[in-house]
Amino acid sequence: MVIRHKANGAMGVTKVMGVGAVRRKGFTLIELLVVLAIVAMLLSLAAPRYFKSVDHAKHTLLVDNLRQTREIIDKFYGDTGRYPESLDELVDKAYLKSAPVDPVTGSATTWILVSPRVGLPGKVFNIRSGAPGADRFGRPLGDL
């Protein structure tokens, strides 16, 4: 039933529900399933790209950590005439604020320390990642 009325000089329409009519609240099961299917489809498209970008960011951070730590080792050698005995010595002598963390493994203890040639003092000439796997170009992470 529709009732026409005049309010403030303008014609208006009011809908009146019949006796026994129930106003619907909420969503039907079909509507919820359709929405969930759409959300699942969107997630299946976005999730692989997200995780790929997270791995790429970790590899980029690993390369930068290696570059900076190698520069610090070279500066230590330039200042002292020898290579450090450990990464902790670089922290103790204030060359580093803290031991670098391998972003792929999430640990500061998985680094592979490369010794200098025979006859050079010290134990840390170079540093490599102990993380398994390869970067996006196929290079092993331990060879970066």
Image: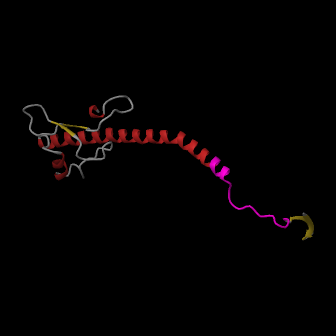
Front position in the image: 70 or 78:
70
Magenta residue check for 142: no
Give me the residue at 63% from left, 49% from top.
Answer: 33
Residue 7 quadrant: bottom right
Where does the C terminus fall, quadrant-wise? top left
Can you name the residue that lies furthest to the bottom here? 8
Looking at this rendering, what residue extends furthest in the front direction? 20
In the picture, residue 15 is in which quadrant?
bottom right
In this view, the residue in front, 99 or 104, is 104
26 sits left or right of 80 in the view? right
Work out whether residue 125 or residue 137 is closer to the camera in this orientation and state it. Answer: 137
Residue at x-position 77% and y-position 64%? 22
40 lies left or right of 28:
left
**What is the magenta segment's predominant secondary structure?**
loop
Magenta stretch holds residue 27: yes
- Residue 29, given in percent of the width and then of the height, sits at 65, 53
What residue is shown at x 76% (from left), y 63% (from top)? Answer: 23
Q: Is residue 81 above or below residue 3?
A: above
Quadrant (top left, top right, bottom left, bottom right) of the N terminus:
bottom right
- Total labels drawn: 0
List x then y, in percent, for residue 47: 49, 42
Coloring basis for residues: secondary structure
Q: Position of residue 102 (x, y in %)?
A: 29, 44
Above-or-below relation of 16 to 126: below
Q: Quadrant of residue 114?
A: top left
Q: Observer-nearest residue: 82 or 28? A: 28
Looking at the rendering, the stretch of residues picked out in magenta corresponds to 17-34
Reply above or below: 119 against 36: above
